[in-house]
Amino acid sequence: MYILEKRKSQIFLCASSNSEFAEDSVILGHKILFPRDMRNEFKDMRVKFGSTFYDVRLLFSKKWSESQSDINNVKALLIDIFPDLRAELSVVKTIDGVLDVVKRKCSIIDIRPLEVLAQKFEVKEAEAIIREHKEAAEEFCKSVSVNVFQDQTLQVIPTQHLLCETITFVLNWNPDETTLQDINDVLLELKVLHKYQIKVVGVGTGSVIVTCYCPAEYTSSLIVTVLKKIEILQERGLTDFIVGNCTIWNNVAHEVSEMTNKEIDQITKSTVIDYEDTEKELRQQLAEKNRKILELQQEKQQAHLLPAESNDELNKKLEVQFAIGRRKTLEIEDLKATVRQKEDKIIAIEKELVSLRELSENQLQEIEQLKLKLN
């Protein structure tokens, strides 16, 4: 399943046209997994796709069956739209052969390439058939929750692609309450996406993690476009924007970068005050323990001056006091451990603040460098 942008006003969420509706099918040597309970829905759309393509094929074949010049015009248009199809189109001679190549650019709910041919060459009957299919596809997209696709491979990119062509959007959404159309709506905020061929290749667990493929020649302009729209996307739930293994934008780093030095100093001051209060409490308990130990020592010295018959009573009293002392010792050790933990947390917080500041500064520098390169 993938998203393919074709023009400003339209973005299609699509499932591979080659998909077989077993829960474990193989395409070009790659496994594509579909949840078992989605089998019927995908099967219905697959049948709808095949039927639509067949009906349109008959109309196209009737129109161009005997005109080689018209077929050449169709091929020329397709090569302009999809330059990567030049080699395949150059060897086909019939309209059926051309349509077989076009079919590989379609999917069960995205037949835009077929629609372009129908509109450009004014095949009105085909346009009506395609319009009906698009309506069914739109309803399918709105009804399918992205939760059923978690950790599933939604689209195979059979050719090798660069790491920088992998785009990741992390959205702070509940997958159970999110549909494919919701992803569609967010990507629509990037109004120039018609320039890119972006394919969503997976949906992750937890937050909705949308992993995409974008050709290398478009990634720089995509970064600029996303950064220009970052406030809107942040309101829609975006927490991370990643290209390859480089985080271009991160919500946490952004929030830290927005903090003033005064706010950061205030957090540090608050942490230090908490530490000082704990240290004061510990010192008071330690002083109390020392006082009781001194009292016990004094009582022990006095015991040597008492008659023998009082020794048993004194020993019992001393045992009770020593037991109390041992409990206090354990409590103090626990408090010391707590203080050490707080000290570690303070150090960790300070390190994290420094790290986040550096990360924010580095990301701002990277963004400025990218802007300079693109300008």
Image (cartoon, grey):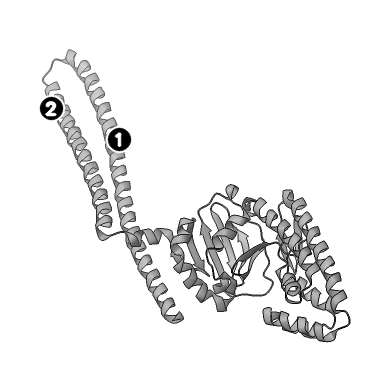
Question: Which of the 4 image quarters holds residue 125?
Answer: bottom right
Q: Residue at x 49, y 64 (%)?
A: 241
Q: Residue at x 75, y 71 (%)?
A: 114
Q: Residue at x 56, y 79 (%)?
A: 217
Question: Is tag 1's residue or tag 2's residue first in the polypeptide sequence?
Answer: 2
Residue 373 % position (x, y)? 44, 81
The answer to whether residue 46 shows anywhere in this view is: yes
Q: Residue at x 70, y 54 (%)?
A: 140
Residue for badge 2: 298
Residue 302 % position (x, y)? 12, 23
Residue for badge 1: 330
Q: Is residue 291 above or below residue 265?
A: above
Mark 1 surroundings within 10 Å by alpha-carbon count, few (fewer than 14), some (14 through 19), many (20 or more):
few
Q: Of the residues shown, which amino acid type is indicated by label 2?
A: Gln
Q: What kind of element bears circle 2? A: helix
Question: Which of the 4 image quarters holds residue 132?
Answer: bottom right
Q: Of the residues shown, which amino acid type is indicated by label 1?
A: Leu
| 223, 330: nearer the viewer | 223
Q: Is residue 284 above or below residue 185?
A: above
Q: Is residue 164 above or below residue 266?
A: below
Question: Which of the 4 image quarters holds residue 31?
Answer: bottom right
Q: What kind of element bears circle 1? A: helix
Mark 2 surroundings within 10 Å by alpha-carbon count, few (fewer than 14), some (14 through 19), many (20 or more):
few
| 180, 261: nearer the viewer | 180
> Where residue 9 is drawn, which disc sits there?
none
Q: Is residue 135 left or right of residue 259?
A: right
